[in-house]
């Protein structure tokens, strides 16, 4: 809809009517602008981005194209894509590219684009799961890399259930319902630590089950607990050192938040885990990453004053197909 009043009925449909149109009499504006040019200029001055105007225009084109490509990849209709782009423009009315630098190698502005796509899908009721949007974004941004598998975005809860069912087959006399409830609670609390960005979901689940067994056994002497003769690291497909580390980090959380309470039993379990690790000795089947990780640091390093932590991380990361996937998942 043009927003202008129609021509008078007697207006001839001939070239002679051009004179009337160009005078502005026949096309009197009937709408109120969302933002006037003066308002747009004021917003721009408030952001102090006058010198960045050219850069903003380039960024606007780059990321609106990015939104278009991702939207097409997701199979969105054009109205959803256009709504995404409109949201993008509205965001940068109030925020400067100085704060959210729209550079292709950065991820902060891409996050704005992804947010606009996600919100637009809700507005236009063309709903997609966020993990599907992340997969599409990764595919567009890294066309030469292996496509993300949305099923990789897992949480430990489902593994807690699967592992407990499997344990029940080995130890039918164990109170698995009680163990599952405790392990699930620990898995929820594990997200208050950083284990979720350090270990895969099945290892976190293994650590939670292992710690749940220790805690329940400490609380109730009659609780049977996990068998000490089973190779739980093999059963849980995780290094025993990792299972113990997940347990230790959750214990550290509980000790920290109950610093004024009685944490004797938690400390006792931590000591037992440490003694268990010492008696077992070093891992004889250690992977290269872990071997490199436990090497003593030669010296501390600092940022060069220009790079940010992500830039430094990129320098030290190996971006093979699996590495690129892992790095992207950590960032998003």
Image (spheres, rainbow, N blue to C red):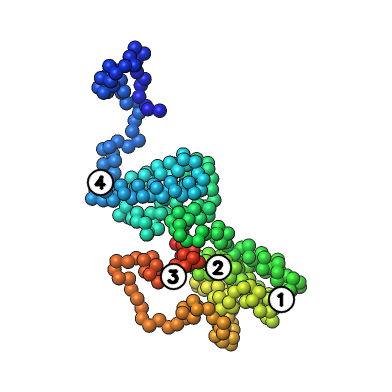
> Disc 4 designates what residue?
45
Mark 2 vs 3: CB contact within 8 A:
no
Q: Is residue 212 visible?
A: no
Q: Secondary structure at mark 2?
A: loop
Quadrant of the rendering where the N terminus is positioned = top left
Marks 4, 3: nearer the viewer: 3
Q: Which of the labelled discs sits on residue 318, or is there none?
A: 3
Marks 1, 3: nearer the viewer: 3
Q: Which residue is painted at 25% across and 19% down in the image?
A: 19
Q: Secondary structure at mark 1?
A: loop
Q: Earlier in the sequence, mark 1 or mark 3?
A: 1
Spot occupied by residue 290 in the image (x, y as percentages of width and height): 50, 78
Q: Secondary structure at mark 4?
A: helix
Spot occupied by residue 30 in the image (x, y as percentages of width and height): 34, 25
Q: CA distance from mark 2 to mark 1?
A: 28 Å
Q: Earlier in the sequence, mark 4 or mark 2?
A: 4
Mark 4 vs 2: CB contact within 8 A:
no
Q: Which of the labelled discs sits on residue 224, or is there none?
A: 1
Q: Earlier in the sequence, mark 4 or mark 1?
A: 4
Question: Alpha-carbon neighbours of circle 3 within 10 Å: few (<14), some, or many (≥20)?
Answer: few
Q: CA distance from mark 4 to mark 3?
A: 42 Å
Mark 4 vs 3: CB contact within 8 A:
no
Spot occupied by residue 57 in the image (x, y as percentages of width and height): 30, 47
Q: Residue furthest right?
A: 173
Q: CA distance from mark 4 to mark 2?
A: 47 Å
Q: Earlier in the sequence, mark 2 or mark 3?
A: 2
> Disc 2 designates what residue?
200
Spot occupied by residue 249 in the image (x, y as percentages of width and height): 52, 73
Residue 228 figure quarter? bottom right
């Amino acid at each position: 809809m043009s927003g202008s009043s129609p021509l008078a009925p007697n207006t001839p449909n001939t070239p002679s009517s051009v004179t009337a149109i160009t005078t502005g009499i026949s096309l009197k504006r009937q709408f109120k602008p969302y933002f006037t040019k003066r308002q747009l200029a004021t917003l721009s001055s408030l952001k102090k981005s006058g010198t960045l105007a050219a850069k903003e225009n380039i960024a606007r084109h780059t990321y609106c194209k990015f939104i278009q490509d991702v939207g097409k990849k997701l199979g969105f209709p054009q109205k959803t894509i256009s709504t995404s782009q409109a949201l993008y423009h509205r965001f940068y009315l109030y925020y400067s590219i100085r704060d959210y630098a729209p550079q292709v190698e950065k991820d902060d502005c891409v996050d704005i684009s992804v947010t606009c796509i996600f919100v637009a899908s809700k507005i236009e009721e063309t709903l997609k799961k966020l993990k599907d949007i992340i997969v599409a974004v990764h595919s567009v941004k890294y066309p030469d890399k292996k496509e993300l598998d949305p099923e990789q975005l897992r949480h430990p809860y489902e593994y807690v259930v699967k592992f407990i069912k499997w344990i029940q087959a080995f130890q039918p006399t164990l109170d698995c319902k009680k163990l599952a409830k405790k392990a699930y609670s620990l898995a929820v609390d594990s997200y208050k630590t950083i284990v979720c960005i350090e270990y895969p979901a099945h290892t976190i689940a293994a650590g939670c089950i292992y710690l749940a067994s220790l805690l329940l056994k400490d609380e109730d002497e009659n609780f049977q607990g996990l068998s000490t003769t089973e190779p739980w690291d093999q059963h849980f497909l995780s290094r025993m050192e990792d299972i113990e580390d997940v347990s230790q980090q959750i214990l550290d959380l509980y000790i920290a938040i109950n610093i004024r309470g009685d944490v004797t039993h938690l400390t006792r379990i931590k000591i037992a885990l440490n003694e268990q690790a010492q008696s077992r000795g070093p891992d004889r089947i250690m992977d290269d990453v872990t071997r490199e990780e436990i090497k003593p640091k030669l010296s501390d390093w600092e940022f060069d004053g220009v790079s940010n932590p992500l830039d430094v991380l990129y320098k030290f990361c190996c971006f093979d197909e699996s590495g690129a996937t892992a790095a992207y998942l950590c960032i998003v």
